[in-house]
Structure formats: C-alpha cells, structure tokens
Amino acid sequence: MDGNAQYNPRTVEEVFRDFKGRRAGMIKALTSDVDEFYQQCDPEKENLCLYGFPNAQWEVNLPAEEVPPELPEPALGINFARDGMQSKDWLSLVAVHSDAWLLSVAFYFGARFGFEKPERKRLFSMINDLPTIFEVVSGNAKKQSSNSKEKTSVSNNSSTKPKSNSKSAKYSSKGPQPLTKDEEDGFDEEFEEEHGDTLCGACGDNYASDEFWICCDICERWFHGKCVKITPARAEHIKQYKCPSCSSNKRSRP
C-alpha cells in the first residue's frame, strides 16, 4: 500500500485533497476499471478490502496486519458477496462501504491534527458538495435537468460541438460539421449552461466544455473520454457506446 507512504495531510484543504484522490481511485475501480476489479475480488481468496490512495490509484488487498492500523480500515471481505449478488447490486454495496471509509479517513485526520468545529464543518461541506461514490456508481448523481436530456453521444471544445437540440450523435457518417465563429461562441454558453451540472460517471467531476465527453447509450451517463479510454477519433466509429459498467452487467447477468 505504497500510496499511503509518509502522507499526513494537516490542513482542511490537504485533507480534502486526500479525500478526492482516494475517492477518484475507488470510483475508477468501480467504473472504468470494473472488469479488473471484478477479477481481483475472487471469492476463493481470503478477506479482501478495496483501498483508494491519494494519488487516485486503487488496490484490492488483505487488511493491514498492524493493530491498531495506521488508518481506519475499509470494509472487510468484499469479495465473498461477489457471486451471490447481481453485479450492479454488489458494486453498489462496495460503493456504500467505500463512502463510509472515505469519511472515516478524512475525519481521522481531522481528529489527529486537532481540527476544531469550524474546520470540521468546512471539511464536511467541501466533501458534501461532491456526489458520493454510490451516487456515481448507481447513476443517481445529479447530471442534468430532465428538459435538457438528449441523445448527443459526444461533446468537446472543438469547432464540431453538437447543437443542444440535436438528438443525433455528434459525429455523423459524414464526419464533423463545422460551425461559424459566432455559432461557436453562442453555443459554448448555451451548452455550458445546460450541462454545467453534468457529472462524469467515472470520476464524478463536473462537465467542462474544454474536455471530450461521451454518453453511454444504455444508462445515459456521461464520461470523460480519458476516463473510459475513448478518443474523439475512435468515437466517430462507435454506433452505440456502452460504458464499462453496462458492458460488465451484461456479461455477468445469469
């Protein structure tokens, strides 16, 4: 567990940064890296835990041997329930326990370094502004208002941004259609306003117009292209995109 080596956040901002890094790693395990995570959680192995690290990496490993441990420990034995539940339900269960662990680690640091009531309140407020891992994994995180839902499959900051009232994929069979400079400027504001609350289904971060995004045609969640390893060039040739979670659910369904 090298991700924790000699790392002791001492301010509210440092603890929150630690929280975000660990959270990003665990979200990655339960979304974009879900196939690898599923394989590592072999029910035949001993009690396993899912760890998130400040550097946004994750690891499935045995619990710490030292008693008491250096940090609070995550839920033990997540692998045992893997084959006894629907994949989606199992991932949601792991997500809930991961949320609880992240809070325990954050407030462990707060207690260790003497955070007083105002600091604890500010830390919780900063954490509470982010969707939980469970909300991201289950698709319940606030994404966009119902009147702005559309079947636009991809978006980025190039001159080929989709019009907000389009229901077709951004990349048509004829290739990207350029916009004029005035159309681009007007579209940037309109699209940012409509999708400003959209959250990446993998990392949980908000929509930004300067990043490439792709929408799953099954669950209709949006993802950073980099989070699901899809480039704009590759997206041009995808007729129906399925995110890692939807692809995994289909394969594991009995």
Image (cartoon, helix red, strand yellow):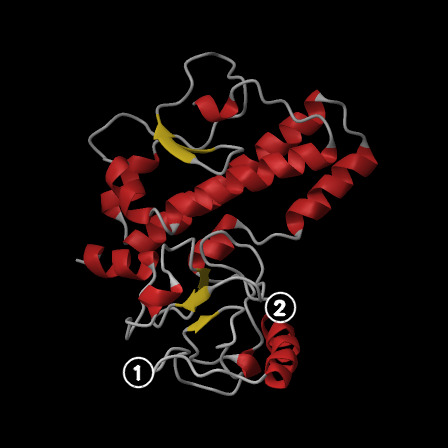
| Percent of width and height locating residue 52 | 47, 35
Q: Quadrant of residue 43?
A: top left
Q: Image quadrant for the C terminus? A: bottom left
Whole-angstrom CA distance, mark 1 to mark 2, is: 28 Å
Q: Position of residue 111 (x, y in %)?
A: 70, 25
Q: Secondary structure at mark 1?
A: loop
**Residue on which the image places disc 1:** 173
Q: In the image, is 203 to the left or to the right of 10?
A: left
Determine the secondary structure under disc 2: loop
User: Does residue 205 appear in the picture of this structure?
Assistant: yes
Disc 1 + disc 2, Cβ < 8 Å? no
Instruction: Write down the quadrant of residue 223 in the picture.
Output: bottom left
198 relative position to 60: left or right: right
Image point 82% across, 38% down: which residue? 118
- If the image is split into quadrants, where does the N terminus sit? top left
**Front label number (1 vs 2):** 1
Q: Indicate the position of residue 120 as horizontal and vertical percent values.
A: 75, 36
Q: Position of residue 46 (x, y in %)?
A: 27, 25
Q: Is residue 72 above or below residue 16?
A: above
Q: Nearer the viewer, residue 116 or 173?
A: 173
Q: Residue furthest top?
A: 66
Q: Is residue 233 above or below residue 92?
A: below
**Residue under label 2:** 196
